[in-house]
Image (cartoon, rainbow, N blue to C red):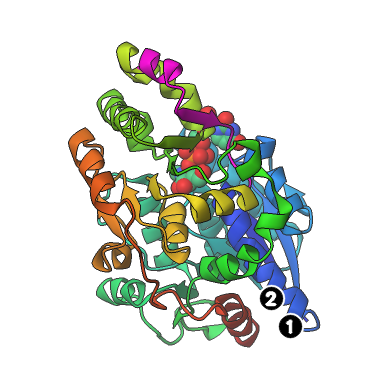
Amino acid sequence: MKRILNIVGARPQIIKAAALTRAVKERFASALEERILHTGQHYDSNMSAVFFDELGIPKPHYQLAVGSGSHGAQTAKMISGIEEVLLREHFDGVVVYGDTNSTLAASVASAKLHVPVFHVEAGLRSFNMTMPEEQNRIVCDHLANICFAPTATAMENLRHEGIADSQALFADGKGRKVVNSGDVMYDNSLYYAKISASRCDIIERLELKNTPFVLATIHRDYNTDNPDRLTSIFSALLAIARQTRVVLPLHPRTAKLLEQNIDSQVYNALKAAENVLIVPPASFFEIIELERQAQVVLTDSGGVQKEAFFYGRPCIILRPETEWVEIIAHGAGILADADTRRIIEAYSTLVGKQVQFPPLFGDGHAAERIVQEIINY
Ligand code: UD1
């Protein structure tokens, strides 16, 4: 029996870990025992606990409760907390997800103790080194014993950085493996789409049944922390709200900075705009239902971009670039950055557009493939 530690901390990681937990429970329970460590990077109940309840993941066995802080302080607390757990108990490997500060801390703590690191969602690149997520994912990919790439583009990115199958790089003479596993979020989208409608009432509660609306999410630090960018994005949302309803589940980072960082005129218009529904962060079932029903999705989130694609919804990306270049290449998304005019034009171009979903993100069995590789390693 192998023993692995799943390390999560931020909202999207809890959702990605659910795919592995499901695969272990359904197919590999006799070969693999998993434990969960929660760093506490996200701590509000609607950013964390709700996902454990909804997705049926066991409660974390270890909780570090590090909370918010500067990048250095937050990451340092996580590294030392994870190290303590890894020194106390034996694990055959640590599974890390995506690109957050929790992913970085987990990879650094484990690699230094020669505990194998398995990176799920490896090889994504925005080629924008100002993003904390880009810095985090580059370090994690270089430290990982197995890189699980979700797409062919991610495989290619890893190859360009010299990250490839190799011999004897790690403790016990172990080598590195690079695997095109497919995307665990695609597994999740297939699985949860079947049950989300019956498990939440967000469409009825927000009175959206048979009402066209766009879904918007904004949380990236370079949007929330920059008054010009945040004001431009909200000006565009207000213009779109003259044509259709806008639903905006608000991330706590954005909620804290909204009044301080957007122009007061735009802020007052936003407060008065009946067509803009600002709601608390959505649960996973709720966001799936909103994504499935929206005319168009506006987002700076990587995960939401992709889910829009999975559910055949066109997407406006509020960033200068994206790691998920396939979405743009298939005409299912437009990069509009934080430019009011480009966002409004993109909305006109995409509204009513039917998006086809070619199978670019795997076959819905990524998690099983990942668990099998971990057991074999
Ligand atoms: C983090 C990830 C980002 C991911 C996102 C998903 C990093 C560098 N960024 O961004 O890649 O897409 O999570 O949501 O790791 N806050 C609360 N309650 C919470 C969580 C956060 O109030 O439960 C507030 C705090 O003021 C905190 C701020 O939000 O300082 C930012 O949180 P943080 O975890 O640092 O980054 P995110 O913006 O959530």
Asked if residue 277 is among those painted magenta in the image, a careful observer would answer: yes
Q: Where's residue 64, x and y in %?
A: 69, 43
Write down the region rendered in magenta: 267-283
Q: Which residue is mark 1?
A: 27
- Depth check, front residue: 263 or 60: 263
Q: Which residue is mark 2?
A: 23
Judge whether 248 appears above or below 52 on screen: above
Quick check: 371 left or right of 331?
A: right
Judge whether 141 appears above or below 53 on screen: below
Q: Residue furthest front?
A: 210
Q: Where's residue 296, x and y in %?
A: 38, 49
Quick check: 37 left or right of 363?
A: right
Q: Residue at x 77, y 74 (%)?
A: 25
- Depth check, front residue: 303 or 119: 303
Q: Is mark 1 within 8 Å of ligand 1?
A: no
Mark 2 Cα shell of 10 Å, populated few (<14), some (14-19), many (≥20): many
Q: Residue at x 31, y 68 (%)?
A: 326
Quick check: 62 left or right of 101?
A: right
Quick check: 82 left or right of 177?
A: right
Q: Residue at x 39, y 45 (%)?
A: 299
Mark 1 Cα shell of 10 Å, populated few (<14), some (14-19), many (≥20): few
Figure quadrant of the C terminus: bottom right
